[in-house]
Amino acid sequence: MIPRLIEIEVQKALSRQAAVALIGPRQSGKTTLALTIAERRKAVYLDLEDASDRSRLSDPALFLDPLADRLVILDEIHRIPELFQPLRGIIDRGRRMGKGKGRFLILGSASIDLLRQSGESLAGRVSYLELTPFSALEVDDERAVRERLWLRGGFPDSHLAENDEISLAWRKDFIRTYLERDVATFGPRVPAATLERLWTMLAHRQGRMLNAAALAKALEVSAQSVTRYIDLLADLLLVRRLPPLHANVGKRLVKSPKVYIRDSGLVHALLGIPSLTALAGHPVVGNSWEGFVIETLLAVLPWRASAFFYRTSAGAEIDLVIEHGGGERWAVEIKRSLTATASRGFHSACDDIGATRRFVVHAGNDRFPISQLAESTGIRELAATLAEMG
C-alpha cells in the first residue's frame, strides 16, 4: 500500500474529537486507509452499502452504545444520512462516561459542504478531512512516475494498473459507474447521456472560464441546468471551480470561475487519450498539466489558506494565487517545459496584487531563482513547501 499523507491528520483528529469525517470521491482509497487504521485500533467496521451492516443499525443506540471503548468506522455514510441525528446522542452519552474521543470514523463520497448539510447535528463533535486521489508527494520522487501519475490520474486502481491500457479501461468503467449509478444517489435524476456530454465538454475546456450559456446551448438545456449539473459534479469532488481573485487594483477583472475536472486521468479518459505520446500532441496538454499541478498543490494547502486565479480583461494572468492570511500572497505560474521563466504578464499581474512570493512551476526537479523576485521550481518541491506549512 502507498502510505497516505493524510493518515497522520486522521490520527490527530481522532485523538481530539469524537468523530472524524473522511471525505473523498469513490475509489480514492478511503476504505483502504480506514481499514489500516482499524487494524491498529481493533475497530468495528460497517459498510453501509451492505444490507446486513445496515440492519445492525436499525436501532443505532442499541448497537453503538456498548461500543464506547472502540472506534467504529461507518463507510458510505451518505447512504443513511438520517444516522447523523442519533449519533449526536450516542456521542454525548459517551462523553458523560469519559469516552469522548475517537468514537467514529465516518467515510463519505460527497463533498464536505454536502455532508455538513446532513451532519449539522454533529456540530462541535466532528472534524472534516478530505482524501484526494494520489498526489505527487505520495508517489516515488521520479519524473517518470510523476508523468504516469499525470497520465493515469491518482485513483489507486488506475495509477497502479499493470499498463496504460488497463488503466484507461478502469477509468472508462469508473466514469460509466458514476454516470449510471452514483450521480443519482446525490442529486436529481440527470440523463446519463447528457451528463457524459457535459463531462466531455468540460474535459475539452479544462482550465477555461465557465461559460454556462455556451455549454447550455450545446447541450440544448438551460443555463440553470448546466450550473446545477456542475454543482453536483463539484459536490462529488470530481470538478473544481477555481474562483477569481477580486482585488481592488483599478483594472477590469474577469468574474467567472475557472473549471477543472479534478483528476487528470479522468480528463484523458474522457478525451480518449491512451498514452503520454498521444497526450503530448493533444491540444489539452497544457491545460491538463495546469490542472494536475493545481490539484497537487491544493491537496496539501494549509487549512487557513485560500486559492484563486487572477486575470485582467487585458490578459495579465496568474494561474494560481494562494492567500495565506496576514496579507501574504503567493503567485504561481505553471509551465509544461522542464525549465521555465516567467512571462511579463505574470510579473505585471504579481505587481497588481502585491504578491509576496512568485513561483514558476515546471515539469523538472530543479529549484533555482530566476530573478530577484521569482524562483523556478518543480511541482513536488513547491508541494513539499506547502505541506510543511500545514
Image: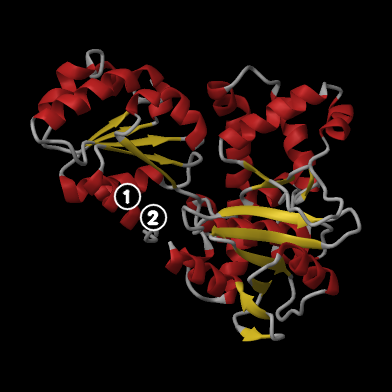
Disc assigned to residue 66: none
Q: Position of residue 25 (x, y in %)?
A: 51, 40
| Residue plotted at (55% across, 28% down) | 182
Q: Most extreme residue toward the top, as rendered?
A: 58
On screen, residue 324 above or below 110: below
Give 343 or 48, whichever is nearer the viewer.
343
Instruction: Report helix, strand or loop for mark 2.
Output: helix
Image quarter of the N terminus:
bottom left
Q: How many marks?
A: 2
324 with respect to 98 (left or right): right
Q: Quadrant of residue 357?
A: bottom right
Q: Amino acid at mark 1?
A: Val
36 with respect to 372 (left or right): left
Q: Which residue is mark 2?
A: 6
Task: Determine contact: label 1, label 2, CB under 8 Å.
Answer: yes
Disc assigned to residue 10: 1
Q: Position of residue 52 (x, y in %)?
A: 28, 20
Q: Position of residue 377 (x, y in %)?
A: 62, 77
Q: Amino acid at mark 2?
A: Ile
78 with respect to 97 (left or right): right
Question: How far, Cα to Cα, is label 1 from label 2?
Answer: 6 Å
